[in-house]
Amino acid sequence: MDFNKEVIEASKIQPVLLDFWAPWCGPCQLLGPILEELEQEAKGAWRLIKVNTDQEQDIAMELGIRGIPDVRLYIDGKEKARFSGALPKHQVEEFLKKNLPDYREEELKSILSKMNGSTTDLEIFAENNPDMHSASMALAQKVLLENPELAINMLKRIPPTNSDYQKAQNLIPLSQLLNFEKQENDIGALIYKAREKVMAGDFETAIVSLIEAVKLEKTFYDELARKATIALFNYLGDDHELTLRYRRQFDMALY
């Protein structure tokens, strides 16, 4: 076996899963079919190579194989992860899910780069991949103003363990702002004005109106003005010129 060619170089193109086994190893006989089944299910996402340690003693010794079955995952020419023993199928699946790159990210990037006003392809992709939280976040940000209900449904998919969770929670108040009904008092009028300006795409005037509402009464309508301002900053992004221009004014209005 040419280890450098079949594993190191090959893993730069496609992840390689090495299964160190031997014919006399009982646990190996249990694990082997599981790995072969998962490789078929993966449809080319990764490649399984079975290494008979009786026949490849030099490789087993060089890699420090002390017991079998021993399974090692190589990606981009390097060992990424390993496990030993005959794990049940669901645990092997968890191992692969945790350590294999998610190639759906490339498909998502392609969809986003080709978007020309329509979000149909992104909606289909997000619906077909409900566990892909980056797709849910991307769709939520794209449709938040036009379809706040869909956006909120996407944002609620994102679990607390995800890095985008807090960002998702901060965007949710925009739906409340967009559903805010007109009121006669001064604070309500400012918030409703902000709602109208957001709908029209005039984010600067919306932010100014919300900051004025915060100055008048921070706790009005469950602190909607404060929460909506933060939501707008998150929607626009930390580096957006309006976020940079008005964040300090907003911070001062809170105190």
Image (spheres, rainbow, N blue to C red):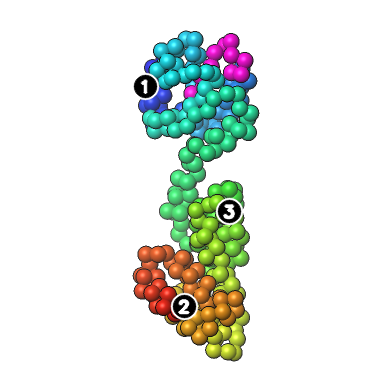
Q: Residues within 10 Å of mark 2 (few under 14, many from 20)?
A: few
Residue 18 percent coordinates (x, y): 48, 23
Name the front one of labels 2 and 1: 2
In this view of the protein, which residue sits in the foreground, 191 or 144?
Answer: 191
Q: Are marks 2 and 1 in contact (CB under 8 Å)?
A: no
Q: Whole-Å distance between the Cαs marked 2 and 1?
A: 61 Å
Residue picked out by circle 1: 4
Is residue 193 at all visible to an observer of this figure? no
Q: Are marks 3 and 1 in contact (CB under 8 Å)?
A: no
Q: Which residue is drawn at 44% across and 16% down?
A: 60
- Considering the numbered disc 1 on the image, is that residue within a helix, a strand or a loop? helix
Q: Where residue 254 is drawn, which disc sits there?
A: 2
- Residue 58, quarter of picture: top left
In this view of the protein, which residue sits in the foreground, 166 or 101?
Answer: 166
Residue 20 percent coordinates (x, y): 51, 19
Image quadrant occupied by the N terminus: top left
The amino acid at mark 1 is Asn
Q: Which residue is drawn at 58% across and 89% down?
A: 185
Q: Where residue 159 is drawn, which disc sits there?
A: 3
Residue 63 percent coordinates (x, y): 42, 20
Q: Residue at x 56, y 79 (%)?
A: 219
Name the front one of labels 3 and 2: 2
Q: Is residue 152 left or right of residue 167?
A: right
Q: Earlier in the sequence, mark 3 or mark 2?
A: 3
Q: Residues within 10 Å of mark 1 (few under 14, many from 20)?
A: few
In this view of the protein, which residue sits in the foreground, 47 or 212?
Answer: 212
Image quadrant occupied by the C terminus: bottom left
What stretch of residues is rendered in magenta? 18-28
User: Please, which residue is most extreme toward the front here?
Assistant: 255
In this view of the protein, which residue sits in the foreground, 16 or 164?
Answer: 164
Q: Residue at x 56, y 76 (%)?
A: 223
The amino acid at mark 3 is Pro
